[in-house]
Amino acid sequence: MSCHEIEAVRLGLMNVLGVGDQSAREHAEKELEGHLEGPIEGLVEADTLAEIQRHLDAALVDLEEDVAAMDSEDPEYDYTRGRLLEVRNAERAIERLSVQGESIVDGMGEAHDTLHETFPVEE
């Protein structure tokens, strides 16, 4: 079992932010071969933070259901719970990134307004 959700989030963030090298992308894509469906596919193909948030939420629901259905004696139980924690961490990180991005956009608007107040343009 692998943490497909985290690799898929990485690929989605590479899309959104325009970062990451080709070898990292190829490695992540190889890890996800045969698992590109549902929220995992949505995360990989995401082009916005809002899409990542939506698909990550769906992946979290799926993992919560998996953990709830597992026997605590199952050898994969702890690992699956760990995946659940990491997906929750990723969800919080994406939320912080969204809030920070909105703050930057607001700051640019304020800078624009200040510039026009300081140097009025007559038309």
Image: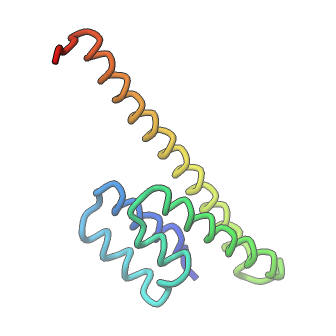
* Image x and y of residue 6, in percent: 51, 67
Picture layout, residue 73 above or below residue 10: below
Up-down relation of residue 39 to residue 113 (above or below): below
Left-right relation of 66 to 11: right
Seen in the picture, residue 70 relative to 5 is either above or below; the reply is below
Please tell me which residue lies in front, 59 or 116: 116
Hey, which residue is sitting farthest left in the picture?
A: 123
Residue 115 in picture, x, y percent from top left: 26, 17
Q: In which quadrant is the C terminus drawn? A: top left
Of residues 24 and 14, the one nearer the viewer is: 14
- For the point 47% across and 65% down, the residue is 9
As drawn, which residue projects farthest toward the front? 123
Q: Residue at x 48, y 73 (%)?
A: 42
Quadrant for residue 67, please give it.
bottom right
Q: Quadrant of the N terminus?
A: bottom right
Which residue is drawn at the image coordinates 66% and 61% (left, top)? 85
At which x and y percent is residue 51? 49, 62
Q: Is residue 45 left or right of residue 95?
A: left
Residue at point 47%, 78% (across, down): 41
In depth, the one of 10 and 23 nearer the eye is: 10
| Rendering quarter of residue 82 | bottom right
Q: Give the number of marks.
A: 0
Is residue 83 placed above or below 50 in the rendered structure? below
Residue placed farthest to the bottom in the image? 34
Residue 102 in the figure: left or right of residue 72 = left
Name the image colouring.
rainbow
> x, y percentage for residue 107?
39, 27
